[in-house]
Amino acid sequence: MTDSTTVGPLEGLKVLEIGDLAEVAGKLLADAGARVIRIEPPEGAKSRHQGPYVDDIFDVNHSLRFAASNTSKLSITLSLNDSRSEELLVKLFQDVDVILDGSSIGTSNNILMNAEHVLELNPEIIWCSITPFGLTGPWKEWHSSDLVQLALGGPMMSTGYDDHDLPPIRSDGEHSLAIAGEYAVTALLSALWLRDMNDDKPGQIIDVSVHEAVSATTEGAFANWEYMQKIVLRQTGRHAAPVRMSPWQYPCKDGEYVLMMGGGIPREKKIFDQLLEWMDEYQATGDLYDPSYVEVLYTDPTMNVEIRNHVSETIGRFIQLLPAEDVYRRAQDLHLPWGLVRRPEENLDDPHWKEREFWWEGEISGYQSTVLYPGAPYKFEKSPVYLRRRPPLLGEHNYQIYAGELGYSQAKLIAFAESGVV
């Protein structure tokens, strides 16, 4: 693990995170060195009430779902819809650079949470709002969920099986929140850069719509319709496309699957020739040396679909003769973007992941030993991103923040707790 004294790329940035839609954005900032204080309701964030749990026993501090999105953060509790919380909120707002607001539109419009009012108190603050449909427009007060967002935003229509009597599907993991979180962080960093480039250091409000973020992440579906008026078709285990393509996934000799990106067809003739030489070793090339195939393969992929599918299916029959690991390694040596279809736990011992130190070892409440957390998808040479602290217990930092930093007495904190404010 990286030395805990190492300065991260966002070291010194102070962030106050509110609500359930901002979890991913807050994690990305916290792991990069920002001081992220998450405000939770006294009963705990929504994700604390989602499993799985350590040892399958419910406890708000043992949720793996919460842990995955809340590394490196501090946790305080505060009832945002209670007017008595205004005093605490005002003090919290005055000493942060960013308010990451993933609360409901109703909470955002509450006078205690009004962004314009906070900017009057602290003109340099960046207020980033993440709501289902944005702060304006006829849908602004609509409720939503991950299932609704992936359906209404478009990705689900491109995801599913060859059998279109089956409905579209979505993968688990609340991808819509991850998508919106990534967009929010990009916007936030841009706003911070703009603020720091100006002498008057202007703060501003960033309005992130989960729906719009998801709708901007439909890969080729929108482009195919906009430019060619073609609707892409859901296809099992491969990209949706305007035409029906042959399978990309095949079981190998040992029963394990390999996915051949693009149906296994190389994008360069040189690599196609090398692939044929490999197939020759097993007398599996069939008629693929016919020059007419090369002529077709490097034209518009929506044309001559039957010929392309014949080539792809011939390659697919070939890889079924070999163990999956052998196919994967040899294909990568030829610069073919093929990969094993792995179970999640099979990544834990991969030497590539280990060499890049992708897995972060750390603690989790309720478990005696250490666990591995997925790390960051990027590396900074001089300012590493890493696990700075385990996911916080509910309200773990109440005393540190309210008493140690805001100056409230222990008696006052007890009164706040007994009245349900914290």
Image (cartoon, rainbow, N blue to C red):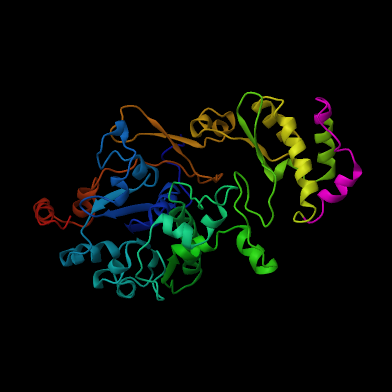
Q: Is residue 159 left or right of residue 420?
A: right
Q: Residue at x 70, y 44 (%)?
A: 246
- In-front residue for pair 289/15: 289
Q: Residue 289 appears at what percent x and percent y?
A: 88, 38
Measured from the top left, where is residue 335 in percent x and y? 74, 38
The residue closer to the viewer here, 270 or 166, is 166
Question: In the image, what residue occupies the spot 82% across and 40% down?
Answer: 272
Q: Which residues are magenta?
A: 278-300
Q: Is residue 280 rendered magenta in the image?
A: yes
Determine whether, in the image, residue 263 is placed left or right of residue 177. right
Residue 104, compared with residue 58, is above or below; it is below
Q: Residue drawn 59% across and 52% down? A: 234
**Residue 354 belongs to magenta span:** no
**371 displayed left or right of 59:** right
Check the picture and name the quadrant holding the C terminus. Answer: bottom left
| Visible residue check, residue 335 | no
Farthest residue, direction right: 291
Foreground: 123 or 160? 160
The answer to whether residue 296 is above or below residue 218 is above
Looking at the picture, how far across and down is residue 172, in whole percent?
A: 45, 46
Which image quarter: residue 251?
top right
Q: Residue at x 32, y 53 (%)?
A: 37
Residue 358 image offset from top left, x and y in percent:
51, 37
Count of labels shown?
0
Left or right: 388 with respect to 366? right
103 or 263: nearer the viewer:
263
Does any portion of residue 113 appear in the rendered image? yes
